[in-house]
Image (tube, grey):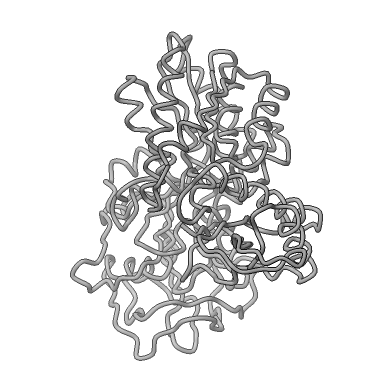
Amino acid sequence: MTEDKVLVLDFGSQYTQLIARRIRENKVYSEIFPFNVSIQKIEEFKPKGIVLSGGPSSVYDKEAPMPDVRIFDLGIPILGICYGMQLMAYCLGGRVSRAKRREFGKAILRISKHIKLFKGISNEIVVWMSHGDRIERMPPNFKKVAFTENSPIAVMANIKKDFYALQFHPEVVHTQMGKKIIRNFLFEVCGCKPSWTMKSFIEESTNEIRDIVGNKKVVCGISGGVDSTVTAVLVNKAIGKQLTCIFVDNGVLRAGEAKKVEETLKRHFHMNIVCVDASDRFLRKLKGVTDPEKKRKIIGNEFIRVFEEEARKIKGVEFLAQGTLYTDVIESVSFKGPSAKIKSHHNVGGLLKRMRLKLIEPLRELFKDEVRILGKKLDLPEEIINRHPFPGPGLAIRIIGEVTKQRCEILRKADMIVLEEIKKAGFYNKLWQAFAVLLPVKSVGVMGDERTYENVVAIRAVNSVDGMTADWSRLPYELLGIISNRIINEVRGVNRVVYDISSKPPSTIEWE
């Protein structure tokens, strides 16, 4: 990449990804590396600046994460945030101690010395604190810049070396002018240029794909979701007819999913697409299975088998394109150590070995919101770009208990009604996710003066920014009433509808 870049070293903060996203919002490319990355890799990355993230440790803990201290000799600006500030002080000869009073939440920051980092910022701002340690003595050549009631040294700086350290978190929305502080670090301190755009990303990615693939062929599995569709369209833009997309109908998709995907990609992008109806095959494998993890494994393994059978029919295939996102990459190299597995619907490692395919992951540098922006630049229809997340195992994990053709049909119809009414009421794009769940219980009802004993459907609607946490959506009673009425009247086999009002955590968004 030719753009200016800023590196974020991850020390385990829940906000690390947010730091990288804030940097990218300013059209500056950023990547997250684990705290113990080698100095050689950092030098190869050629960052214009480094950010040291926060983290749950104390610098005096036995297992405290420590970077290679040679980062302070690279001659580039460094910004330490929370634990990153304490780390900077500790590594450069200052002293850190346990604070008498921990500081969590909002605090008033009073700026006593104006520096490039605070250009255009007033003397007092509200900031977000989250720490139990504080700076007792600054390292040599550092000056105190700002303080709070509980932190005598809340900001310190070595102006000559462009080292800046903040006890608060500028990346969170609770900090006033936090985005401005990050902008000042990027442009006033590091001298970055805002040149990382989706247009430049498309140009670089398509050129890179062409160089890697040459005249060989590529296969791509598509699910109808945003990630796989954007991957397919980007690769298609690069190599056209050398790409074949394989869409597998596993029998647990939403209503009309297969037809919609095929029409979109064929009509709008003139792509090679093979649609395989393997629904009966998947449902036979799922017969009698109620454990959610077993369902996931069966669907994941069967998908690989079907995909492999179809891919083998295409001569000259050497590459597999996959919609891995940056969040998946970070999970596997995070401060907390390699994750046991990346999401099961991304796990196609077996295919690569058996078919001797090489992997192409054009979205591996992007966050979810950036993938949606990329989709817009590639002229994907709004309906696909802004569609709600849909799990790899599909309706199978929204049917609690055994998955059968009949139960799939019941849920499919109920789910379609939920989405239709939410769209009609103008709520679809305001929600992170909305869907129906078929419960493994039956309840007594009365229909047409007759006693019924039928299924219960739960409605789930949540608000979230990234899916990591979520709150249940306060949909209007009138809307919930319309949805309930339609499901009970139109979906044979359902006589009761309930609304899920649990948040994540402690619940999850999906039921299984």
Q: Position of residue 488 (x, y in %)?
A: 72, 59
Q: Residue furthest left?
A: 62
Q: Is residue 463 visible?
A: no
Q: Is residue 489 above or below residue 241?
A: below
Q: Quadrant of residue 302?
A: top left
Quadrant in the picture for residue 503: bottom right
Q: Residue at x 54, y 41 (%)?
A: 405
8 or 226: nearer the viewer: 226
How far across and how far down the image is residue 428, in percent?
A: 72, 54
Question: Which residue is pictured at 74% across the width and 53% down the height?
Answer: 490
- Residue furthest front in the image: 450
Q: Nearer the viewer, residue 375 or 417?
A: 417
| Vertical placement of residue 128 versus 172, above or below | below
The answer to whether residue 403 is seen in the rendering is yes
Look at the picture and state if 172 lies above or below 67: below
Left or right, residue 346 beside residue 256? left
